[in-house]
Image (cartoon, grey):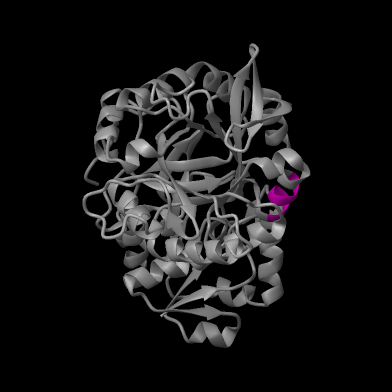
Amino acid sequence: MIGIIRYGAGNIFSLTSALDRLGIAYGMVHTEADLKQCDRYIIPGVGHAGAAMKKLEQTGLVPAIKALQKPTLGICVGMQLMTAYSEEGDANLLHIFPNKTLKFKDSEHFKVPHTGWNRVHQEKENPLFAGIPNDAHFYYVHSYYIEYSDAYTLASTNYTLPYSASIWHNNFYGVQFHPEKSGVYGETLLANFSKI
Amino acid sequence: MENNQQTHIPITGGLAKRIIPCLDVKDGRTVKGVNFVDLRDAGDPVELAWNYSQQGADELVFLDITATHEKRKTLVELVKSVARQINIPFTIGGGINEIADADALLNAGADKISINSAAVRNPALIDELAKAFGVQFVIVAVDTRHVANTNIVHLNGGRIATDKETLTWIKEAESRGAGEILLTSMDHDGTKAGFDNSFLKVVNDAVRIPVIASGGAGNKQHFVDVFEKTNVDAALAASVFHYGEILIPDLKDVLRGHQIEVR
């Protein structure tokens, strides 16, 4: 069963609806005891990364999340929380990944928030992207991005610059796009995660 | 990796131009005529939405024109049904006047809301919604008409003129926290003669948020034109999709043929 970490950052109806459509079992994680009931986890999140980190800290789950050994997928701000730092709210984050979350620079050709379907280029082989064509489009809505890193970037998207569309380190995975809103390939990714 | 070779990537990276069918909904049912062969119930917005998502629509807009006091309840139920079954983003518009309306729709699974006359009457609503839910949640819809060599914001489907000049209003909406602009040219709407490309280009060049073009789509070339001539982010249409005059996969093939990035 997937445990969805609940900390009050954003609506998860679309995510649970996608899991329902796929027939993937899930439950809500509010406490450390809840964590033990699950074999993998999703950290969702929309909104302000600094504010989201404060809410996550209030749950008391931060040490347990950092110590997780089972597959864990951060989505959007949920993935940004796994980095060391965000410019959004000048906030120190979970530091599961050493990378930083930065704001898109203002530039003539690129509107912010980055909104819509963009190509996701798989940089490494990973079961998370099994059955998904390279450079398939996924749905994005965000103004902050995780910097590209050879060590941790699993897939990249090019918007003003190449950045981390997906990150991966041991049991920790993150995606900046919204798989629950990304059509069939988004559903494939969620199904892949449920089997990792 | 199956494909490491460079594909044609335009200057804006791989960000696709979006094709958005718009559905008018009243009392939980679609109202405009729909002419899909495979639909069991053409009045069922969820089935119609699912059909569009399967065709490759990038996003959907539902405009609710229900006028009863049961409105919010009906709409929330509809949004839940759509969110349960549709795997692409969707926007709800029509009669959203306050934070509580938006909050109910967000919790029911709506990705964005669209506000129009409520924002004109009370511009601070844009700030409040953006602050409460984030700019990405707030589309400001603007209906515009050419009046005596200027562009004027109109309400009630283009029937009532306001005192607002359209570009000035759009820039104000952007500065207040609109995440996207849905711009409908009432002069072009229903004509099937093409989008208002000259004004759309002016608007698109003047703002830093995505612009959705609406009003005037009659054939596939009109979509090519609006993207090539104005560089807007998305194009919305209703009847050409509902009556099957344009099928989305065919439209995307044509756009791809013009090197326009699509999903």
Was residue A168 drawn as part of the magenta stretch in this picture? no
**On screen, residue B227 above or below A51:** above
Give the overall secondary structure of the magenta segment: helix
Check the picture and name the quadrant holding the C terminus of chain B: top left
Q: Looking at the image, which is closer to me, B39 or B133?
A: B39
The residue depicted at 66 percent of the width and 59 percent of the height is: B101
> On the rendered structure, is A193 left or right of B63?
left
The residue depicted at 55 percent of the width and 34 percent of the height is: B210
Was residue B130 drawn as part of the magenta stretch in this picture? yes
Q: Position of residue A53 (x, y in %)?
A: 67, 63
Q: Position of residue B134 (x, y in %)?
A: 65, 50
Q: Position of residue B227 (x, y in %)?
A: 42, 25
> On the rendered structure, is B1 left or right of B97?
left
Q: Looking at the image, which is closer to me, A171 or B17?
A: B17
**On screen, residue B184 above or below A48:** above
- Magenta residues? B127-132
Location of residue B159 by image quarter: top right
Location of residue B143 by image quarter: top right
